[in-house]
Image (cartoon, rainbow, N blue to C red):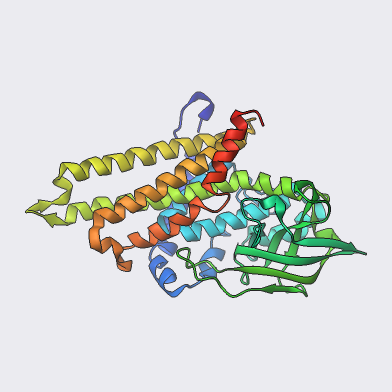
Amino acid sequence: MNAAQGQFELDADQRAIQDMANAFAADRVAPHALDWDRDRHFPRDAIVETGPLGFGGLYVREDVGGSALGRLDAVIVFEALAKACPAFSAFISIHNMAAWMIDRFGDDALRQRFLPALTTMNKLASYALTEPGAGSDAAALKTRAVRDGDAYVLNGVKQFISGGGANDLYVVMARTGEDGPKGVSAFVVEAGTPGLAFGAQERKMGWHMQPTAQVIFEDCRVPAENLIGAEGEGFSIAMAGLDGGRLNIAACSLGGAQSALGKALAYAGERKAFGKPIRDFQALQFKLADMETELQAARLFLYAAAAKLDRKTADASKWSAMAKRFVTDIGFSVANEALQIHGGYGYLHDYGIEKLVRDLRVHQILEGTNEIMRVIVARHLMGK
């Protein structure tokens, strides 16, 4: 895609990536998504199958098995997977964010130890920043890491961690120094490390196929070589990861909402009222036209933001925040309108619409709430 010239057509390689992701989603995800949601089943086998496709390290370097793709390429993948199941796509997005942090900021020894297994999806990674008392105010985190010889001893609790209790390693932000962002460092903590424990699985509104739990550290001894970057760099690492994470979760919203629109169009052609299909009523036609217009605008916005992050423009963080806010709001709105078009049937699990509404709602909260996205944009506008 030549975004610099305002041309937003995908090139041949990007279309091939999109086709591959669409085919996998249609074959291995879509037929099972409602069952996974109903049964709260974690489909690790299907997730692992994305490894040979290159989806385990989309923007990780090739020497450790990564695909070395761009952020726009990744957005295309997550949008495609989300058409089948936003929660499935979002889980792989979080894994990719954790892997990228190790690749981008870890030393070569750390990269070689962990990334080959992550890029193949033989091991799965979680990202652990949020705490019970530190969500939007992430720099107020209390989990502490104290140096003790050749290790750091971690104590604290992380909240709402996707993959908690199921994944193989955790990229963890913990305080090694002063209060505030400069005192935070990043670590890789492997499952099975003594002192690492997990809370009960959360019972959530959506994202039922993802395990979500507290991650608890009680005198958890982590080797010093598991430090990512240097002491005090953890918060900047976390924020750098979130620029891409926000685009990815927006892509998940876009894909899910596109699926909802497709379901609404099909239903409007089948459902009859007052002697004719409901798609023949102009009021419904206007609603569908607005949904399509909003999704196309959201897609252009998202692709432009991803292209800026690929080019590392000075305003890339602002655009990531704007796109995350705009696309996730549009995505939820379109899915909700699709449910309304279905009437009472939209409220039934078997039609798949209510699942999309439940799954997309959390996208307006995680990776930074949409209120925080507005704060970020305002700070950029005011030169702060």
Q: Residue at x 40, y 36 (%)?
A: 297
Residues 6 and 342: in front is: 342
Q: Is residue 336 above or below residue 72?
A: below
Quadrant housing the C terminus: top right
Q: Of all residues shown, which one is farthest toward the top?
A: 5
Number of marks in picture: 0
Q: Nearer the viewer, residue 347 or 292?
A: 347
In the visual, does 149 lie left or right of 120?
right
Indicate the position of residue 383 as horizontal and vertical percent values. Answer: 65, 28
**Residue depicted at 33% across the width and 37% down the height:** 293
Instruction: Give the image location of residue 181, x and y in percent.
Output: 75, 47
Against 125, is 287 above or below? Answer: above
Residue 384 appears anywhere in the view: yes
Q: Position of residue 366 (x, y in %)?
A: 55, 53
Residue at 59%, 75% (x, y): give it. Answer: 200
Question: Is 128 in front, or is 159?
Answer: 159
Residue extending furthest toward the right: 149
Taking the image as shown, residue 334 lies to the left or right of residue 300, namely left
